[in-house]
Image (cartoon, rainbow, N blue to C red):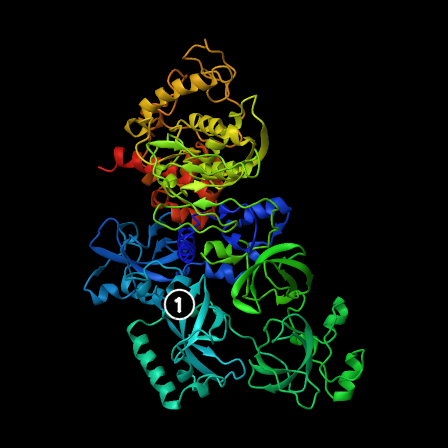
């Protein structure tokens, strides 16, 4: 997501009006794609996402490059100078569960190791490097002749690839092995015996943008998923005595000599950095077909996937491939042909459309208005392909009408759009693509298509998703002014922005052209003290000013920016709930905060009148314990008159209490700064009664910084209370011990995952945040909480048992 945001900002930097964040404008348009959030969209519309398990190609792409049953050589724990052969039992991200050869089906000695840190080698490494192969002490006496045992055990087995155990590709998933510049061979669309080399220009989660060797521009680029049967490793055509020539539509662009020179150059380059063959290990084996020349069938149009049309088998190449051609009865017809196999997506038996109530596109040149298959077969002296040729014509893979997903735009394959399933018929889906400027008919895709993806796929792979179009708001836009050296360009209406030298700070006159309900700019004074709630770095990234515009819109934008700049956005949202004065003319707005993967909403009262804005801004700053000038109609150009930069957070909280008492003594009691019900005379040792929170807040650990106003009751957590003391070495924990520990923490709901994954103490100590997120499929918030508990175990282990 950071990479996506960085690229978007680079794209927008050509404008002098620098847009730091998408919520800059309070109108909605196509430009707000960065704001689209699937979780919020599904929640607001009540829609359902298509299940992730329905996308088999995506599921395969997330699997590890290591496969159960692979052999490798591992250092013995008891004797680090010796090694022994081990078998991969299962994988979990970059973690491998191994079992030494000789243990048979005994699981007691299984152990986890991290590919990135453990000493792992392919079979044969010890022999090449004169290292000793020796079985573990526990089974040393099990066999008298270990050499004979190894010969039998390794016969017919597969060793873990050396390039996945060392070097730049160590521990990478299959998709990550395909890097930009990798070369492979691509089969021609119309000839199964014709291939040509292509270079990977882009890899988006396994979806490859391929550029034919010899072509420099991207005009003829092809998008294919890495599991597509058209893709083969470099050298495949030569090994199988197939033709290696550029596609027919590209041959005229260069001479035969130039094409050959380009091919030789890329072959020489690929020898230096070959593409690992593990990339193609998951390619499906094609089954034999039973089609014959002249057979008729129905097929989703290959040129316009918006309707289904009759096609004919015009050539059978071999037991795997055959050619179909779209029926066209006009004299000037140009044949539109495609190579298919028995499992090609979109091919259907005759009468499929009739049985499913779907309209069938009549062949061009067909005389009758009503198309009838029986008459058509009789007139053409052909036969229909039997249903046995289509083994999976009716499976829907769990897709249901009105589910949502992400799909490639067939008109522009570079674009991936938000899509809704409008109907499901057998193995075909009708999709309505959202967010397109021009209306596009519902496209038809097969459930096995590799051009559809689950919700969140683009976000995961940092690829731009075209979101649904949003209605344009009737309110006027508000503008953000940015740093001092830029000439400010505004969208509407154009008004020049001038930076007037001020002595310390000087109020800026309100713009009263549009009445009392419009205000001038509200400045974000980045040098002022940000307080304990707001992140100073995020504050520095905010625009210099917001406005002019309608008061409620300007203030809503400012408050949204402050919430997003907080350490804990939900906490700031809660603090903003009671900033209203009784005499203010307020309007209620709903603000959102995202924290630990969850979204929280609360209604905030915002002033409507321009003359009340200074008091409102100051009141909010006091509430957030920051400098009163952090954001206000006042622009601070030099040192803040409050001298806030000279204060520490602890001392500053004392000054905040003075401001608080001065401004709010009749409305807000000092003894209940967070909305409690205690009186001013409450005992300082008594716990304050908390208001019902609008978010889930984790218990705060002790800190050297005092974030609480002076005189407020405090609840402290000592260091001894937070430290974990282990009764037994976690390296000796069984799976049950790990489950027991997790159950005792605030992550008890996740304990069953540890049971299912057979994670013992050794595996627990190897877990990291990326591994937990990837293998346990947790959101960021729960994953961080779980890793916090794991880190407590690690710290206790190092303190008690590491020596």
Q: Based on the displayed image, in which of its 4 quarters is residue 585 positioned?
A: top right
SS for dot 1: helix
Viewer-side residue, 90 vs 529: 529
Q: In this view, does 547 lie above or below 154?
A: above
- As drawn, 556 above or below 5: above
Q: Position of residue 350 (x, y in %)?
A: 72, 76
- Can residue 715 be seen in this snapshot? no
Name the spot of residue 782 as percent of width and height, x first: 46, 40
Classify residue 296 by image quadrant: bottom right
**Quarter of the image holding residue 242?**
bottom left
The spot of residue 358 in percent (x, y) is 74, 68
Q: Which residue is drawn at 30% across and 58% down?
A: 143
Task: Classify the position of the C terminus by image quarter.
Answer: top left
**Residue 419 sits above or below residue 768 on the image:** below
Position of 735 with respect to 675 (left or right) is left
At x 45% / y 8%, what residue is drawn? 681
Please identify the residue farthest to the top as the structure is shown. Answer: 681
Residue bearing mark 1: 278
Question: With respect to residue 180, does 639 lie above or below?
Answer: above
Local crowd at mark 1 within 10 Å, few (<14), some, or many (≥20)? some
Judged left or right of residue 135, residue 62 is right
Residue 5, percent from left and from top: 42, 52
Q: Nearer the viewer, residue 364 or 785?
A: 364
Q: Nearer the viewer, residue 476 or 75?
A: 476
């Amino acid at each position: 997501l950071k990479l996506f945001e960085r690229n978007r900002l680079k794209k927008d930097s050509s404008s002098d009006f620098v847009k730091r964040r998408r919520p800059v404008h309070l109108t909605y348009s196509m430009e707000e794609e960065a704001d689209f959030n699937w979780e919020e969209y599904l929640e607001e519309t009540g829609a359902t996402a298509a299940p992730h398990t329905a996308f088999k190609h995506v599921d395969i792409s997330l699997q590890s490059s290591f496969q159960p049953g692979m052999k490798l050589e591992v250092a013995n724990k008891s004797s680090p100078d010796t090694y022994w052969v081990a078998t991969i039992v299962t994988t979990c991200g970059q973690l491998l569960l191994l079992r030494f050869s000789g243990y048979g089906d005994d699981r007691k000695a299984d152990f986890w190791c991290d590919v990135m840190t453990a000493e792992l080698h392919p079979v044969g490494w010890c022999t090449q490097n004169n290292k000793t192969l020796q079985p573990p002490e526990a089974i040393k006496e099990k066999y008298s002749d270990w050499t004979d045992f190894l010969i039998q055990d390794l016969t017919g087995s597969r060793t873990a690839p050396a390039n996945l155990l060392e070097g730049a590709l160590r521990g990478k998933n299959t998709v990550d092995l395909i890097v930009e510049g990798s070369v492979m061979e691509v089969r021609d669309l119309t000839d199964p015996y014709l291939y040509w080399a292509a270079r990977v220009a882009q890899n988006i989660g396994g979806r490859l943008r391929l550029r034919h060797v010899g072509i420099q521009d991207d005009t003829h680029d092809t998008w294919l998923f890495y599991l597509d049967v058209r893709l083969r490793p470099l050298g495949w055509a030569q090994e199988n005595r197939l033709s290696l020539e550029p596609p027919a539509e590209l041959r005229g662009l260069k001479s035969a000599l130039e094409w050959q020179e380009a091919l030789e150059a890329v072959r020489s380059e690929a020898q230096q950095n070959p593409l690992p063959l593990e990339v193609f290990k998951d390619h499906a084996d094609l089954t034999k077909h039973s089609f014959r020349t002249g057979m008729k069938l129905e097929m989703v149009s290959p040129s316009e996937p918006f309707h289904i049309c009759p096609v004919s088998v015009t050539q059978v190449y071999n037991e795997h491939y055959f050619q179909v051609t779209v029926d066209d009865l006009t004299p000037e017809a140009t044949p539109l042909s495609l190579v298919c196999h028995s499992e090609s997506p979109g091919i259907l038996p005759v009468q499929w459309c009739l049985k499913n109530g779907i309209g069938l596109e009549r062949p061009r040149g067909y005389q009758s208005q009503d198309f009838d298959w029986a008459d058509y077969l009789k007139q053409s002296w052909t036969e229909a392909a039997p249903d046995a040729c289509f083994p999976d014509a009716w499976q829907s893979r769990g897709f249901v009408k009105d589910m949502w997903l992400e799909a490639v735009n067939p008109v522009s394959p570079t674009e991936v759009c938000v899509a809704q399933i409008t109907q499901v018929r057998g193995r075909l889906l009708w999709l309505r693509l959202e967010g397109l400027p021009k209306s596009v008919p519902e496209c038809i895709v097969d459930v096995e298509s590799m051009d559809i993806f689950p919700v969140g796929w683009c976000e995961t792979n940092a690829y731009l998703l075209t979101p649904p179009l949003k209605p344009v708001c009737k309110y006027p836009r508000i503008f953000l002014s940015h740093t001092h050296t830029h000439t400010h360009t505004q969208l509407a209406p154009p008004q020049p922005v001038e930076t007037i030298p001020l002595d310390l700070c000087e109020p800026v006159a309100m713009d009263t052209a549009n009445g009392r309900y419009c205000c001038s700019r509200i400045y974000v004074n980045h040098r002022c003290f940000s307080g304990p709630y707001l992140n100073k770095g995020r504050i520095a990234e905010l625009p210099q000013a917001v406005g002019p515009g309608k008061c409620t819109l300007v203030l809503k934008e400012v408050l949204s920016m402050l919430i997003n700049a907080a350490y804990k956005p939900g906490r700031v949202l809660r603090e903003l709930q009671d900033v209203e004065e009784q005499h203010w003319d307020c309007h209620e707005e709903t603000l959102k905060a995202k924290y630990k993967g969850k979204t929280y909403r609360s209604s905030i009262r915002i002033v409507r009148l321009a003359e009340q804005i200074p008091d409102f801004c100051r009141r909010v700053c006091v509430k957030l314990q920051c400098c009163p000038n952090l954001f206000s109609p006042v622009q601070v150009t030099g040192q803040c008159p409050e001298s806030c930069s000279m204060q520490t957070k602890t001392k500053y909280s004392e000054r905040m209490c003075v401001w608080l008492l001065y401004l709010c003594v009749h409305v807000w009691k000092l003894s209940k700064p967070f909305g409690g019900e205690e009186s001013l005379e409450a005992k300082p040792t008594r716990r304050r009664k908390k208001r019902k929170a609008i978010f889930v807040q984790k218990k705060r650990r002790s800190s050297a910084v005092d974030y609480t106003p002076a005189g407020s009751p405090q609840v402290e957590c000592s260091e001894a209370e937070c430290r974990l003391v282990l009764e037994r070495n976690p390296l000796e924990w069984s799976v049950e011990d790990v489950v027991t520990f997790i159950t005792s923490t605030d992550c008890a709901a996740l304990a069953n995952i540890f049971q299912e994954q057979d994670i013992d103490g050794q595996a627990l100590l190897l877990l990291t945040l990326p591994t937990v997120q990837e293998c346990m499929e947790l959101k960021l918030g729960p994953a961080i909480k779980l890793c916090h508990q794991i880190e407590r175990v690690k710290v206790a282990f190092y303190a008690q048992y590491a020596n």
